[in-house]
Amino acid sequence: MSDQSQPTRPVLTRLLLVLVPLAAMLGAFVWIASLDPLRSFNNGAPAIEALTVERSILDETGIGLLVRAGGSEPMVIAQVAVDDAFWTFTQDPPGPIARGDAVWVQIPYPWVLGEAHFVNMLSNTGTAFEHEIAVAVPTPKATGGQLRLQALVGAIVGLLPVALGLMFYPAMRGVGRGA
Amino acid sequence: MAADTIPSVDPSRRALLVGGLVAAGGAAIAAGSARSQSAPDPMAGHDMSNMPSDPYAAPMSGMAHGNMTTVGLVDHDRNGFDPTSMLTDWETGRTELLPDGRTLRTFEVDAVDREIEIAPGIFFPAWTFNGRVPGPALRAKEGERLRIVFRNLGSHPHSMHFHGIHSARMDGVPGAGLIGPGEEFIYEFEAKPFGCHLYHCHALPLKRHMHKGMYGLFVIDPDPARQSEPALSAVAASRVLGSPENANWQELAMVMNAFDTNFDGGNEVYACNTVGQAYMNAPIRIDKSRPVRIYLLNVTEFDPINSFHLHANFFDYYDTGTQLTPTLRTVDLIMQCQAQRGILEFSFADHEDGMYMFHAHQSEFTELGWVGMFDVRGPAA
Ligand SMILES: [Cu+2]
């Protein structure tokens, strides 16, 4: 290939060689959009709804759930039932949840330590989204005390063994020399 | 603090900790003071120490059990029917006198597809009779000639199948009054036997047509003239809607129903007259100086039985309402399977004023909407 030199075309020709396919491509886009070839796949089915619980927090105020919507339309949480009982709840921020957005759902439910609970969120269409809390325990909080405890555990498993091991160093330094 | 006095250290976590220490040549005894993160530990001094291990045992603001409720209110105007007015909204049709002296009573019923709000914010694509669920509470008198002009304005085949005595041609099953969209059929039969009955669509699959909302009360009042015993004749007269003997009764039409909103074969919302918790949000006013009579029907699909429990009072129960003497006397709970129905009679005359609860005594149904209140007061209170 290297020995065949391309004949140099005029600038206008080269520009046209780019513009014509570009125009054809744009034309195709407009044509496809106007044709809406996917419309035959629209069978009148209702919007797809999806809710995912990403975090759950159990504390003295009840059950808190971080819920993310993934529906094709904004999702509405109409009612919440815990263990087959409708329960009051608050949603922050309130209102329909756009696709990809997350809200906190706070349910003042008297959960029971060590037992299982089922949260059922009903959308405006009556679609049910269940979330199981397999074993209810209080969610640890990031507090000064909690961090001190975790630092203590880290010291016990990380620093203490090394320090203890190093204490043997003077004795072990002499091993094998006295032969 | 010795290790064995820590009540709830996760054994696997402790083993890991101890094993790690032993492997590192450290002192295993240090594990005794290791604290679990998974259980509240009053010795730790951090803020979980003031968290009760059992939330039931502690007073928690905003966590009263009174929070067992739906959030918000149903828009009855948009629904086109109100559970409170439904209680006393009897459909009596129109009457004319036949040449033989009997009464001909004509009802007009349309099947209509309609989206209804069954709990605040939850919408259900219902199939209805006359746009409401339950359908109109039809009321006639024993011995009358009945004509029910039924038009199917819905999107599926439907029928009206009456629980009563009639010919096979009028039964509302396929081949006998089951009609397609846009068609009309006239059911004709005599009103008998007297009692508390129902009608429902009998198109197939029956489960779907039932739980989509196609059912209603069909009450036939007894003809006092057909009773030879004066006492029974008086009881019969008290049941005839519009009679002087009936005027003092507070009569209520109640249909226990439920909705499978996600069509998984189990109900999400339970109710009396369709709207979950309707009579918690709007208690039923009862004048305690007058007796109460409930025409009760169960049409709940998927669950084998439903029930009615009255708080702080007892009632007499007439199963199916076809007798003028009670089937059960002095009970505070009755069960009904699907399509079972009956008449409850009770009085609050000797009670103090107050809110008296009624509900299914399957706690699950109660807490999913089938619960209400009687607001009992004197006539002027
Ligand atoms: Cu039907």
Image: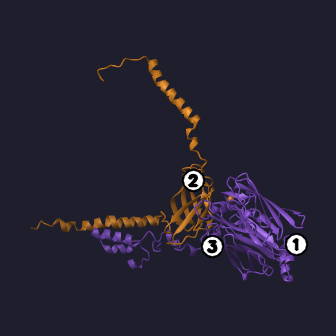
At 81% from the left edge and 77% from the top edge, which residue is drawn? B291
Q: Secondary structure at mark 2?
A: loop
Dot 1, crowdedness within 10 Å: few (<14), some or many (≥20)? few
**Percent from the top left, x then y, of residue B191?**
80, 68
* Colour representing chain A: orange
Asked whether residue B119 appears in the rendered view, the answer is no
Query: Residue B32 lies in what quarter of the image?
Result: bottom left
Rounded to the nearest angstrom, the CA distance separating label 2 from label 3 is 30 Å
CB contact under 8 Å: marks 1 and 2: no
Q: Position of residue B136 (x, y in %)?
A: 77, 62
The chain coloured purple in the image: B
Kind of element beneath mark 1:
loop
Identify the residue shown where x is 63% and y is 53%: A95
From the image, tell me which residue sits under label 3.
Answer: B363
Question: Toward the viewer: B241 or B209?
Answer: B209
**Three-letter residue code for mark 1:** Ser
Check the residue under mark 3 and report the chain it is in. Answer: B
Q: Which residue is denoted by mark 2 in the rendering?
A: A49
| Colouring of the image | by chain
Q: Quadrant of residue B294?
A: bottom right
Q: Earlier in the sequence, mark 1 or mark 3?
A: 1
Chain at numbered mark 2: A
Ligand 1 shown in quarter: bottom right
Q: Which mark, by number, is residue B158?
A: none
Quadrant containing the C terminus of chain B in the rendered view: bottom right
- Marks 1 and 2 sit apart, C-alpha to C-alpha, by 54 Å
Relative image position of residue A145 (x, y in whole percent): 46, 67
Q: Amino acid at mark 3?
A: Ser
Name the residue at 62% across, 58% down.
Answer: A126
The residue indicated by pointer 1 is B243
In this view, the residue in front, A143 or B176, is B176
Residue A55 position, x and y percent, is: 50, 60
